Image (cartoon, grey):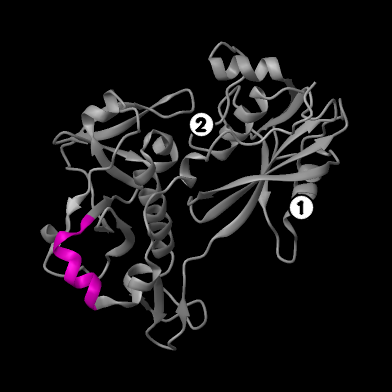
Amino acid sequence: MTTEPFRLGGLPALSRSTVDRQEMLRSDPERLRARWPDARVLVVDRFGRSPVPLDAVHDVPPGGIPLAPRKAIGFGEQPPEEACFLGEWNGADYWMLPGSPPEDAASVSVDGGWGVSQEAPAAEGEAWIELRGHGALLDDTSAGLLTTAEALRNWHWRAHFCARCGGRTHRRQFGWATQCEQCGREEYPRTDPAVICLVHDDVGVNGEHVLLARQPVWPPKRYSVLAGFVEAGESLEGCVEREIREEVGVEVRDIRYLGSQPWPFPRSIMLGFTARADAGAQLRPADGEIEEARWCSRAELRAAFAGTSDTLMLPGSTSIAYVMLKAWAQAEA
């Protein structure tokens, strides 16, 4: 048995980024407008899909699929009102604007990373893919850009009115703030913290079995680790203890932080933890929330990752749950 506690083997898919957000430039309109003609624009539709080269979908490059940004000058001489500044990379500014695939777009099947394929619009040598299902297929730069773009898109979709007086709002700081036209209140993009915890038994350092559960709305055989939102006035560790107790009736201890990943669906950040529980602890799934919970061995998990399990389907590779489970499966007890 090992003496080393397991750790994540790499960054979660949506934690990857190479872009400098250049926060100070959001209040420097002269600089951003001057560089607009040479900037690049990600177009994102109302479903969160953005175009990528079609051939890259069929044959994913070693470094991942790149996005297919447009030349900013094609949208006008100045950034449109709805443009959101994403940051700078390799000397170019990157922005996000709403767009949509052509109405006569065909469809192409893209591996969704959950053991199933998803249909994506395809036209003019491009496929429009979405972050939640296909984020792990993107290269590092594209993953960071589209994650930020999707977070801002979801926030603006809900930010048309002031939370104080109900007045209409308008955008400021090139997409990074809104201001009420009636009372002047400013608001900024929100992120809701949620914990996600891999619970294993107390045999050895890393345990011999991991706790998995499934929600009623999930397809048969699909399981994951447990997660939940942090409540007001609650610590992260307290949330871990409460969520595991509420969802499966198990007490945990030795809570340890693993890593984090933004999850902009619509505005979360997933804070990954691991914890220990008594081996063979009785599981009592919460009515209406958890359809089934089970202890799974490392061998069962390895078979699922190898695609040879008939009884277990794991989370998609875009999720932090995938990275957590893979790290545990590769570790020694």
Q: Earlier in the sequence, mark 1 or mark 2?
A: 1
Decide if residue 243 is on the left or right side of residue 203: left
Q: Where is residue 157 in the image (x, y as percent from the top left)?
A: 39, 62
For residue 172, what is the image quadrant?
bottom left
**Element class at badge 2:** loop
Please name the residue that numbered disc 1 is placed on.
Answer: 237
Which sits in the foreground, 286 or 91? Answer: 91
Q: Which amino acid does label 1 sit on?
A: Glu
Q: Where is residue 285 in the image (x, y as percent from the top left)?
A: 77, 35
Residue at x 33% of width, y 60% of height:
87
Residue at x 45% of width, y 28% of height:
113
**Element class at badge 1:** helix
Q: Give the range drawn in magenta.
A: 30-40
Q: Distance between the residues labelled 1 and 2?
A: 25 Å
Please name the residue that numbered disc 2 is placed on.
Answer: 316
Residue 156 is covered by the magenta coloring:
no
Q: Which amino acid does label 2 sit on?
A: Gly
Is label 1 in contact with label 2 (beta carbons under 8 Å)? no
Q: Position of residue 82 (x, y in %)?
A: 27, 66
Residue 33 is covered by the magenta coloring:
yes
Residue at x 25% of width, y 57% of height:
91
201, above or below 304, in the image: below
For residue 149, what is the image quadrant?
bottom left
Magenta span: predominant SS is helix
Instruction: Answer yes or no: is residue 235 visible.
Output: yes
Residue at x 25% of width, y 51% of height:
43
Decide if residue 301 is on the left or right side of residue 120: right
Image quadrant holding the N terminus, namely: top right
